[in-house]
Structures are given as C-alpha cells and as structure tokens.
Image (cartoon, grey):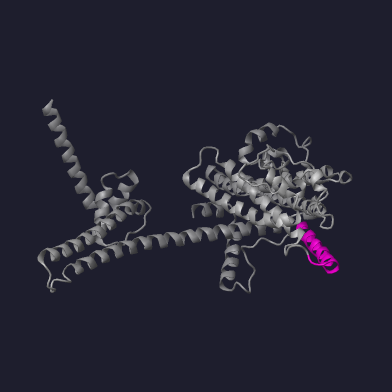
Amino acid sequence: RKQHDNFTATFGSSDIYEWQKMVDAWQDGPHNQPNPYADPPVEQSTAKVRLELAKEESSITQSEGSLAHEMSPSALIVRGLELEDQSRYYIALVQACKTRPQPNQAAMLQERRTALVRKVQKWRTIQLVYMPTVASLLSSGEPPHDPSLTAASIDSVPIIDPFVPPLLLPSSLPISIRQTLTPRLNLTAKETRLRAAQAEDALAELRRLLKIRATSIQFKKVNMVGQRAQTRVRSVLTLFQDKIDRVANRYRAAQAALVSLGPEEKQWDKLFPMLNANDVRGPGKESDDAPHHKKKKATANAKESEGRRVLSWIWTSETASKDDCSDDELALLMRCEWARSQARAERWEEEKILLVEEMRRTLTYSDWKATWWRGQAALRDNEHLRADIRDGLRAYAQKQAVMWEQLAVSFATRWYKLLASNGLKTDWPEQYRIAAVDASLKTPNKKFRARLREDHPAKLSMILKSLSRLWMSTRVSMVRGQ
C-alpha cells in the first residue's frame, strides 16, 4: 500500500480521478467498458511474420502433403524464441543474487529452473523431428556456443549458465551442420525472418520504455520538490529499468543470431547495429535521463554540451519513425501501470484482513477443541469399567485439552506482538490474549511497548513497577554480598 501511495503521489489529482473513474466503471461492467489494466495495442512485426509463415506452410501442406508433426516448423522456431527469452530472464535472476541467495530465493530459482528444463525437454522432442542432426550434438556432450544466451548482461559480458539447456536453434549451429537441415523446411530462412522481426519489435519497445522514463524524469524536475518526493519518482523509474534491460538483451540476442545466420549481402550488422550499454539512453541528455545505477557514467558525460551531444543510433535507425509515441499514448501506458499497482495494493489489503481472520479462527477452533476434549473426559463414567481404565481415559482427555490450549497459547504469543506493533486488532478469546500480553512483556521493544501502553495501561504500569522493585532488591542483595 505504501508503494502504491508513493506511486500515486507522482501524478496529478485530475489524472488519478479520471483513472479511478475508469477503473470503477470497468468493475461495474467489464463487458461494456474498456479494460484499464490492458496495455494499448501495439502493431508488432513478429505477428505479421508469423502470419505470413503460417500461410506459406498451409499452402505447402496442401500441395505436398502433411508435415511430420502437428506443430509446424515456424511454430517450433517461435516457441524456441520464447524459451530463449525465459532462459535469459532466469540467468538475469541468478546474476541478481550477487551474494549467496537466501533459502526463499534459492527455492524460487530452483523452481524456475525446473519448470524451464521441463519446457525445453518437451520442446526438444519436436525439435528432433525437424532437426535430427541436433541429436548428434547432444550426444557428444559439447554443444556449440549459443550466441542468444551470451547477452544477459547490460554491459555485454558473455554469461553462460551451465544449468540452462542449450536450445540449438539454426543460428547457433555450425554452418556445416546447418547445411544438412531439410531444404524443404527452410528453417534457417524462417528463423532469419523471425529474428529480424524480433529485433525490430525490441527496438520499438526499447524506444517506448525510454520515452516513458524520460517523461517521468521531466515530470520530476518540474513538479517534484524535496527528498521524499524525489525518492517516490525514483521508485517509479526502477519499475521500468528492469523492463528496459530485458528488452535490450532480447535485441542483442536477435542481432547476434542475425549476424550468425547471414547472408553476407544482407549486412545485418548495419541494419541492426550492436547495442552497447551507452547506446541505451533516451532522446535527452544522458545526465538527464540516466538510471540511478549508472550515475557515475552519467556524471562523466554531463560535461557534454547540448551542441556536441550525439543522439543514440536507436533514435535514428530506419524503424525509429514507425513507432512515434504521442503524449496521449504515454498517458495510457502510465494509467495501466497505476491501475495494476492499485490492484496489487488492494489484493494485499484483502490478504491482510484474511490473515487476521484466519488467526482468530485458529485460536477459536483450538479453544473449542480443548473444551470438547474436556467434555469427553466423563463420557464413559456410566460404563462398567475398572477404576484405573476410567482414570486413564480422563487423563488422556485432559492431556488432549491441555495440548490444544498450549498450542493456542504458542500461536497467540507468536502473533500478538506482530499484530499489536502494526495496529491490528486481536479479537481473540480473552485467556489467549492475556497470555500473549504476559509473554510479550518479557522482551518488548520501544514501538511495541508504546502500543501496549495504549491497550493495557494499568497492567503495563503494574508489571513495570514490579520489575523495578525486583531489580532494586536484587541490586541491594548483590551489594550486601560484597
């Protein structure tokens, strides 16, 4: 909620009113209102190429017969590009853990790796149908270098995680093996067309995100005053930086694959140049829109005058004029980010309410269970049982009742301090509330003691006075003993 409030503070009240009005209208009638959470549609080159390839394969199927698998060759390449993007994202997560990851981080990474390996293995069975020569590379144990997984760093440092299975798309195969692929399938040409579309879409998305970042920085310079407001806007910029890095890595992978695929007369390195770290900058000065983790590099370029400033090539390429983003489109993009942030904050508020209620129900059920076991103690008193057996049944019932009570007390002791420190009410059975207060008074912190003073002022004062008298008497005894 605090993060969402900080995010909301970076916009004007009129914008928030219109966005909230749109969200309320959509929630009342989602079928008749525009979706405020959906990004505005963007025309993608990859979608066009996929449609063209699907039509071509459909005509070939009609003339030459069915394919070897229900998944077409172009769909195989498209799925491989998706898995490649997921592999890069996994590598980026591994690199983000600079030190030894915590257990929850390690579990998350292991789960992602397991899911990724399972997807690659499923995709591999189809790949071997269309590319049987890949089997010899996999059996040799030394697959060729995959250029698509060497661009996981924004500084273009080659990084290959040995736990990411190589996809072995045509662009990563040696030319000698690439030439042995079935000519009728034309996998190399299809990947070339898809890679070119992927690079074009990545550049368009990169320019769009950089424009959003530049607009946010300009808004900060004009409207934000003070350290607190500056920190709010900086958290907004951080939301986009990870997206910018991921899109930049996607372009680098596509560009490296195009250079590997050829042909030479296409001159892919000129049509899609290599993207260096200092090329990923907005249309303004580097010192104006550089992310905070590049501050040193931005300071070095700050001396560059406006007259000598050179625009990055990503703004002057052939595809730059196709995706000019207007102010209205930027407002739509920011509205989507705000609506999603509000939805996340509301879901967390609901989770907080549910968690407190689950705690209350757990203690209430434990208390009922203890009472139920005590009711079972005398259930068989009228039966003709030996005295020792009857006493044993009563003792067992009492034991179970005490066990449930102790379990409830341990839960209450663990939960009360957290809830009280955050100002959340504890509508619990009174005996468990008192037990939790008594246990928490032994090691209270400053914030918790202040909250407890509001809830139980008389009890807290009495206990503190008793502790003070006990400490003084102990101190006197120690002095007399010396």
Nearest the eye: 157 or 214: 157
Residue at 58%, 66% in the rendered image: 23
**Range of magenta residues:** 44-66
Residue 50 covered by magenta stretch = yes
Q: Is residue 438 left or right of residue 4?
A: left
51, above or below 157, in the image = below
Q: Is residue 376 left or right of residue 86?
A: left
* Residue furthest top in the image: 482
Residue 389 coordinates in the image, percent (x, y): 14, 65
Nearest the eye: 48 or 117: 117
Residue at 79%, 50% in the rendered image: 320
Specify whether residue 218 is in view.
no
Residue at 83%, 63% in the rendered image: 56
Specify whether residue 295 is in view.
yes
Quadrant, the C terminus: top left
Which of the 4 image quarters holds residue 264?
top right
Nearest the eye: 389 or 228: 389
Residue 38 coordinates in the image, percent (x, y): 64, 63
